[in-house]
């Protein structure tokens, strides 16, 4: 199989995130976000005026604040006017847009950020508003219920069972003890059923947080970072919106995105998977053909911190940061959006040979 | 740290959506206790039906009736139903492949408990008593014994999908309840305003004073932390005349809504102008706030009687 390589070398050169918490009620969205923007710029020594393109991801539904992304832009310092864009999606898709912008040669650097405040609203119900408005949304099936349908399908297919899911939960929170930003760390009880077969331990924590990365192209990346995390490929794919049309035990969109991103050309040593529910890690491992040799979610993943709209970008950031620290040479980052892994993005990152 | 201000915030909206030929027929069918699917060119039957083949994107219009009975393909036990969900007693969410269909429909399944539910179990539609042409015309599914003792399998009729008085749209109400908290800068502003003081914040970089403060200087992208009291008087920088009465607002039209640069502020805030006929309000008019007993913010602004401000003194703030 041959694949067209990106026309330009673009790398993640810096990554910052907040501590993710159950609530950030004492801060507005921009007040929560701004320190992360300052931190990521400080890592590179860049100022807002040095950034060629800025792109953000967020959703007004989370906190119920219309046009909150325009207020968040206050934290960037957008004067004189900057080249800027926003996606009503996870920040991983903002990163995708920024990456394409850099490929065109229109810019050499990009700031990508995303944030989510889930604490002001009823998140499980808020997420029902993204569903098919004719046949599904009027029933208000909440996010845990839909994930539970997928988990039961996996159990019925013999792909997992409740003890195996508990193992995923425990490993994630155990790994998160090394991640000071994580919301749930260490020993977390598996708890009672939320929606059977999923227990509290199988579900992500609900919380607030923000993240930012800086992308740079070519030599600019080498100037800004000792070991840039080069994006060797990135792709995103979506499945039919009808849940009953899909095989919930598989993720063909993830597999296709991974193929297009070049993930299967050589083994990766690390994978940061955006699997908010334990059962979704089972699906992703299968779709991505990850075996025991791959370190999965050393950060603790979304089971340790799941700021909605930022958790996918954080996967890219965490994978890149491991390359920056020379803890990885080739890493896969995955982000998801929608119910039961409906839409999936895969990026493959590499460090220069050591 | 001062106490975090909080207030309930309800976001409520009725979405009015048109349906088109396939979804309209399906929802009209539910009103008439008929379940319709749509056939793809490779012979699959999709229930619920869609207008375009999810695999090929081909336009599909061939409606076929399927049975109101089917098989659970996956399920999840919901012991604590949430507001607006189909049943208010514990139930199973289920994907049900109706007899004659190749895909599954999401709905609630009324069962006594999780031990009574399993993948592969037979269920049938329980119709809502009042049906309007909506997915909720299916009240839920219920367990169904299709052995000969239980009455045997249901046979679909062969409905054409043509109905009298078809449903062409739905109104889908949605309500989400939030707890709003304004953050550090606006909390300080609101608390000061309760003492009838306007306290803005100064940018440490460009020195501009923002009222109300939003916590960051939008020009410099840095936190504004130095608090500065401004006003109470100010200058009308620009205005408009409102001629349409807003819902739930007890103000006679026409009235004037204006941008007001409080003395010492580098950004105009807005407020209503009163105490002067609407057609005499002008740029440069000097105004002051009018408070009502117990209010947490000025009711409106009225002329101070001072000479109008020179355009040059406020032109940067227009
Ligand atoms: Zn400033």
Image (cartoon, coloured by chain):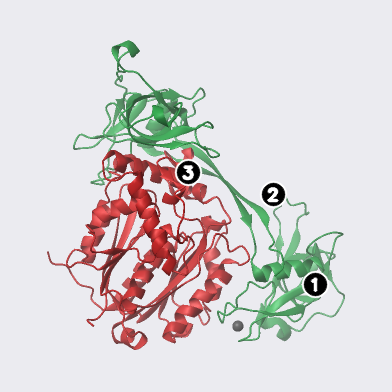
Chain colours: A red, B green
Q: Nearer the viewer, residue A171 or A203?
A: A171
Q: Mark 3 vs mark 2: same chain?
A: no
- Secondary element at image label 2: loop
Label 2 chain ID: B
Above or below: residue A308 compared with residue B111: below
Residue hosting label 3: A192
Q: Which of marks 1 and 2 is nearer the N terminus?
A: 1
Measured from the top left, where is residue A149 in percent x and y? Answer: 37, 41
Identify the image quadrant of the N terminus of chain A: bottom left
Label 3 SS:
loop
Query: Residue B75, position in %: x, y?
Result: 37, 36
| Mark 1: few/some/many CA within 10 Å (<14, 14-19, 20+) | some
Q: Is mark 1 on a helix, strand or loop?
A: loop
The reply, left or right, for residue A70 in relation to residue B61 is right
> Which of the pair A303/A112 is nearer the observer?
A303
Q: As rendered, which of B126 and A134 lies closer to the eye?
A: B126
Q: Which residue in the structure is indicated by mark 1?
A: B197
Q: Which residue is drawn at 40% across and 27% down?
A: B116
Which part of the image, by quadrant, shows the C terminus of chain A? Answer: bottom left
Q: Is residue A104 left or right of residue A262?
A: right
Circle 2 residue: B247
Q: Which of B263 and B129 is in front in this view?
A: B129
Residue A18 percent location from the top left of the image: 50, 70
Q: In which quarter of the image is residue B195?
A: bottom right
């Amino acid at each position: 199989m041959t694949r067209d390589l990106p026309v330009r070398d673009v790398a993640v050169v810096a990554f910052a995130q907040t501590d993710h918490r159950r609530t950030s009620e004492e801060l507005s969205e921009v007040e929560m976000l701004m320190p992360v923007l300052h931190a990521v710029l400080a890592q590179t020594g860049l100022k807002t005026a040095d950034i060629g393109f800025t792109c953000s991801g967020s959703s007004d539904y989370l906190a119920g604040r219309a046009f909150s992304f325009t207020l968040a832009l206050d934290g960037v310092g957008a004067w004189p006017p900057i080249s800027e864009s926003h996606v009503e999606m996870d920040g991983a898709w903002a990163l995708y847009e920024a990456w394409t912008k850099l490929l065109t040669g229109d810019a050499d650097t990009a700031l990508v950020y995303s944030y989510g405040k889930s604490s002001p609203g009823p998140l499980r119900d808020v997420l029902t508003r993204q569903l098919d408005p004719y046949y599904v949304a009027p029933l208000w099936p909440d996010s845990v219920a839909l994930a539970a349908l997928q988990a039961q399908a996996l159990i019925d297919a013999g792909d997992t069972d409740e003890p195996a899911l508990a193992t995923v939960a425990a490993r994630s929170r155990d790994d998160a003890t090394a991640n000071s930003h994580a919301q749930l760390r260490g020993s977390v009880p598996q708890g009672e059923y939320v929606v059977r077969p999923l227990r509290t331990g199988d579900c992500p924590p609900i919380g607030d947080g923000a993240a930012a990365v800086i992308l740079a192209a070519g030599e600019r990346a080498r100037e800004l970072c000792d070991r840039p995390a080069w994006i060797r490929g990135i792709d995103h794919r979506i499945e039919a919106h009808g849940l009953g049309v899909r095989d919930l035990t598989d993720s063909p969109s993830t597999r296709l995105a991974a193929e297009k991103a070049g993930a299967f050309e050589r083994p990766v040593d690390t994978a940061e998977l955006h699997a908010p529910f334990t059962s979704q890690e089972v699906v992703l491992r299968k779709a991505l053909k990850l075996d025991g040799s791959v370190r999965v979610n050393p950060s603790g993943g979304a089971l340790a911190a799941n700021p909605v709209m930022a958790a996918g970008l954080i996967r890219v950031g965490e994978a890149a940061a491991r390359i920056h620290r020379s803890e990885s040479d080739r890493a896969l980052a995955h982000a998801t959006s929608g119910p039961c892994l409906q839409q999936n993005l895969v990026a493959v990152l590499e460090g220069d040979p050591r | 740290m001062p106490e975090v201000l909080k207030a309930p915030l309800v976001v409520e909206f009725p979405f009015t959506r048109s349906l088109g030929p396939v979804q309209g027929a399906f929802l009209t069918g539910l009103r008439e206790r008929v379940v319709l699917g749509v056939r793809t060119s490779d012979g699959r039957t999709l229930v619920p039906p869609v207008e375009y083949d999810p695999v090929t994107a081909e336009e599909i219009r061939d409606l076929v009736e399927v049975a109101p009975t089917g098989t659970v393909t996956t399920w999840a036990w919901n012991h604590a139903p949430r507001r607006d969900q189909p049943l208010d007693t514990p139930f199973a969410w289920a994907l049900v492949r109706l007899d004659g269909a190749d895909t599954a429909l999401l709905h609630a399944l009324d069962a006594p408990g999780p031990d009574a539910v399993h993948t592969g179990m037979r269920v049938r539609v329980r119709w809502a008593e009042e049906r309007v042409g909506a997915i909720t015309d299916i009240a839920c599914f219920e367990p169904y014994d299709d052995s000969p003792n239980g009455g045997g399998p249901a046979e679909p009729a062969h409905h054409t999908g043509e109905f009298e008085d078809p449903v062409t749209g739905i109104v889908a109400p949605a309500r989400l309840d939030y707890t709003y908290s304004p953050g550090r800068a606006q909390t300080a502003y609101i608390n000061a305003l309760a003492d009838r003081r306007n306290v803005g914040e100064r940018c440490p970089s460009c020195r501009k004073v923002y009222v109300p403060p939003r916590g960051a200087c939008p020009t410099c992208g840095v936190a504004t932390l130095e608090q500065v009291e401004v006003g109470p008087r100010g200058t009308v920088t620009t205005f408009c005349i409102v001629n349409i009465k807003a819902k739930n607002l007890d103000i006679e039209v026409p009235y004037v809504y204006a941008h007001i640069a409080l003395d010492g502020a580098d950004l105009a805030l807005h407020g209503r102008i009163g105490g002067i006929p609407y057609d005499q309000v002008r740029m440069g008019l000097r105004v002051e706030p009018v408070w009502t007993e117990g209010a947490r913010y000025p009711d409106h602004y009225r002329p101070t009687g001072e000479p109008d401000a020179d355009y040059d003194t406020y032109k940067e703030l227009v």
